[in-house]
Image (spheres, coloured by chain):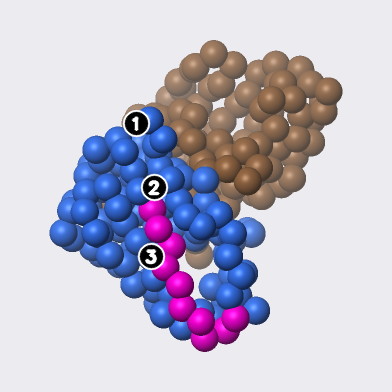
Chain colours: A brown, B blue
Amino acid sequence: QKEVEQDPGPLSVPEGAIVSLNCTYSNSAFQYFMWYRQYSRKGPELLMYTYSSGNKEDGRFTAQVDKSSKYISLFIRDSQPSDSATYLCAMNDYKLSFGAGTTVTVRA
Amino acid sequence: NAGVTQTPKFQVLKTGQSMTLQCAQDMNHNSMYWYRQDPGMGLRLIYYSASEGTTDKGEVPNGYNVSRLNKREFSLRLESAAPSQTSVYFCASSERAGGSYEQYFGPGTRLTVT
């Protein structure tokens, strides 16, 4: 079993919709939870970063962590075509463990 | 600042050939990493270097070697390429080792082994 599970999608939504992305994990030692965004044929870049359970907002993006359920989520409000990318969850112990990534397409 | 640069961008090898992937960062980061990305598998750590002069195995090190040439440069070598090494390779760097530090990624090298 992988340490981090993420549904690879793909996910296609109309512009303005809410995008919901999720990951589950098995390692209770994970402390930091991140979402990276990867545009086609580019390297990943850090989008959001959380440490504790709860919600964190950054503009149209909200990250949620539920450590008791070992479940993290990313919500994108008012999605735009420029949000079309692959979103990878990542979490750490001494190194980062990545999910497989979910490919999102926002249709204009 | 260029950030993290990788060369080459694309490479096709025949089985058994060798090659070295080059990576350099200009952010004065201590730690550097090599990942491979395969469909459905996400990013998997091959090797990392927590600081200049040290290297450690990651999740999938077999078939690879690395050299931390100096603080800026970290190379990945395939001694005898196999079709299973067809992948996209990313180099990354961070201020320090440990998953709590943001990693900055290069643009990737697309390698095909026939």
**Which residue is at 49% across, 17% downward?**
A57
**Which quadrant does the N terminus of chain B fall into?**
top left
- Kindly tell me whether residue A85 is visible in this rendering: yes
User: Which is in the foreground here, disc 3 or disc 2?
Assistant: 3
**Which residue is at 31% across, 38% downward?**
B26
**Which quadrant does the C terminus of chain B fall into?**
bottom right
Q: Residue extending furthest top?
A: A59
How much space separates mark 3 and mark 2, taking CA atoms?
A: 12 Å
Q: Nearer the viewer, residue B19 or A33?
A: B19
- Residue holding disc 1: A51
Name the residue type under label 1.
Tyr
User: Which is in the foreground here, disc 1 or disc 3?
Assistant: 3
- Mark 3 and mark 2 residues within 8 Å of each other at the beta carbon: no
Q: Which residue range is magenta in the image?
A: B14-23
Image coordinates of residue B99 in percent, x first then y, are 32, 44
Q: Could you tell whether A82 is left or right of A90 in the image?
A: right
Q: Could you tell whether A93 is left or right of A82 in the image?
A: left
Q: With respect to residue B11, does B91 lie above or below? A: above
Rate crowding at label 3 as few (under 14), some (14 to 19) or many (20 or more) other CA atoms within 10 Å: many
- Kindly tell me whether residue A65 is visible in this rendering: no
Name the residue type under label 2.
Ala
User: Which is in the foreground here, disc 2 or disc 1?
Assistant: 2
Q: Residue extending furthest left?
A: B53
Name the disc covering residue B92, or none.
2
Q: Say which element carries label 2.
A: strand
Q: Earlier in the sequence, mark 3 or mark 2?
A: 3
Q: Say which element carries label 1.
A: loop
Image coordinates of residue B48 in percent, x first then y, are 30, 58
- Residue holding disc 3: B76
Magenta stretch: includes residue B15: yes
